[in-house]
């Protein structure tokens, strides 16, 4: 974080270890990011190295800290937080996001496709929710529609339940990310029941006839209840989150990811550099699969610029560490 109020740019999924991402980075240039990294200093306590096996992604932990949401790994109550931000009262209840999804079943593993690849529209999503709702209600879980690939769920089963971020699981084998606690037994059973229910559901038969993948399961994330007095009423001063890399990264569209990075460098990074040139306090947080790193600084003097010019390029090396 920066010292005092100022512009703070947070970039999720700025890098990852996928071969396609590594190859794409070899051909990228970040002129404005390079200047920022050369002129900013690492923030004290600004590195978050949780590793690649955490349930919450580095950008989620960084965003939670910015909003004052202090929670254990996999326990950031994003669904309840979103309700509060939308002006609704979570009423102290435990909430979760339910994502209808497609699981690819192999001989010895199951992997999850990106929800966007379902091309799920509201009509199909609402029909599937209506079919699934009675089963959830039997277990004390209320479902409501929010978007084609995101439903809201309320139930005590989500209170204190650690769940893996959807961003962590998409495109990967899900076995290591399924909740194994005693508390999650209800959800694992529901997943099995929904796989049987959805296998012959008319909506899925229509989708297969249209060449679309069937919806054959769901994922639970964003679980938990907000603290009694959350400090989430106002957005953190100056915080901007660059979301452009998110969907291309999850869909492993590395050409699209590279194009989005060039846009971020030319626009958001350029504006942050301009703020720095004007003497404002700025902060930059880059997030990958393993860690988030923050730099901050202030000042537009000639000496800092000359010193920065001597430091050379850093962006590629920094992104490799994330």
Image (cartoon, helix red, strand yellow):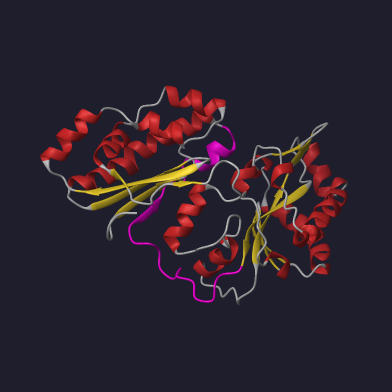
- Which quadrant is home to the N terminus? bottom left
Find residue 165 and report its horizontal and vertical position in percent.
Answer: 61, 50
| Residue at screen point 30% across, 38% down | 37
User: Would residue 113 appear left or right of 54 to someone viewing this image?
Assistant: right
Say if residue 271 shows up in the picture. no
Placement of 259 over or under 39, stated as above or below = above
Residue depicted at 77% across the width and 42% down the height = 214
Residue 190, percent from left and from top: 82, 57
Q: Which residues are magenta?
A: 225-252
Residue projecting furthest to the left: 302
Q: Is the residue 46 above or below the residue 311 in the image?
A: below
Residue 274 is left or right of residue 226, and the answer is left
Q: Who is closer to the viewer here, 160 or 96? A: 160
In magenta segment, residue 155: no
Residue 46 shown left or right of residue 56 in the figure: left
Q: Position of residue 171 (x, y in %)?
A: 65, 37
- The residue shown at (50%, 63%) is 70
Say whether residue 249 is magenta: yes
Q: Main secondary structure of the magenta part?
A: loop
Q: Quadrant of residue 259?
A: top left
Is residue 294 visible to us here? yes
Position in image of residue 49 (x %, y %): 48, 45
Count every numbered label the image shows and give the total.
0
Name the image quarter holding residue 185: bottom right
């Amino acid at each position: 974080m920066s010292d005092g109020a100022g512009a703070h740019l947070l970039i999720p999924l700025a890098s990852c270890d996928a071969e396609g991402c590594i190859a794409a980075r070899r051909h990228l240039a970040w002129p404005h990011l390079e200047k920022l990294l050369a002129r900013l200093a690492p923030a004290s306590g600004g590195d978050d190295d949780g590793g690649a096996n955490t349930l919450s992604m580095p950008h989620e932990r960084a965003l939670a800290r910015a909003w004052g949401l202090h929670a254990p790994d996999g326990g950031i109550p994003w669904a309840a937080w979103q309700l509060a931000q939308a002006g609704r009262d979570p009423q102290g209840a435990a909430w979760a996001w339910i994502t209808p999804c497609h699981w690819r079943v192999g001989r010895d593993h199951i992997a999850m496709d990106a929800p966007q690849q379902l091309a799920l529209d509201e009509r199909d999503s609402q029909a599937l929710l209506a079919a699934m709702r009675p089963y959830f209600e039997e277990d004390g879980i209320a479902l409501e529609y929010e978007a084609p690939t995101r439903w809201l769920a309320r139930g005590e089963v989500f209170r204190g339940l650690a769940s893996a971020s959807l961003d962590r699981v998409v495109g990967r084998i899900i076995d290591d990310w399924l909740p194994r606690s005693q508390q999650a037994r209800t959800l694992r059973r529901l997943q099995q029941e929904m796989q049987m229910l959805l296998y012959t559901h008319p909506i899925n038969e229509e989708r297969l006839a249209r060449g679309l993948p069937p919806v054959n399961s769901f994922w639970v994330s964003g679980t938990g209840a907000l603290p009694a007095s959350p400090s989430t009423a106002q957005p953190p001063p100056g915080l901007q989150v660059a979301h452009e890399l998110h969907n291309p990264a999850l869909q492993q569209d590395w050409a699209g990811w590279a194009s989005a990075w060039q846009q971020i460098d030319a626009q958001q990074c350029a504006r942050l550099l301009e703020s720095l040139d004007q003497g404002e306090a700025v902060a930059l947080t880059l997030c990958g699969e393993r860690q988030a790193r923050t730099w901050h600084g202030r000042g537009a003097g000639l000496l800092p610029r000359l010193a920065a010019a001597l430091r050379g390029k850093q962006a590629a090396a920094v992104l490799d560490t994330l």
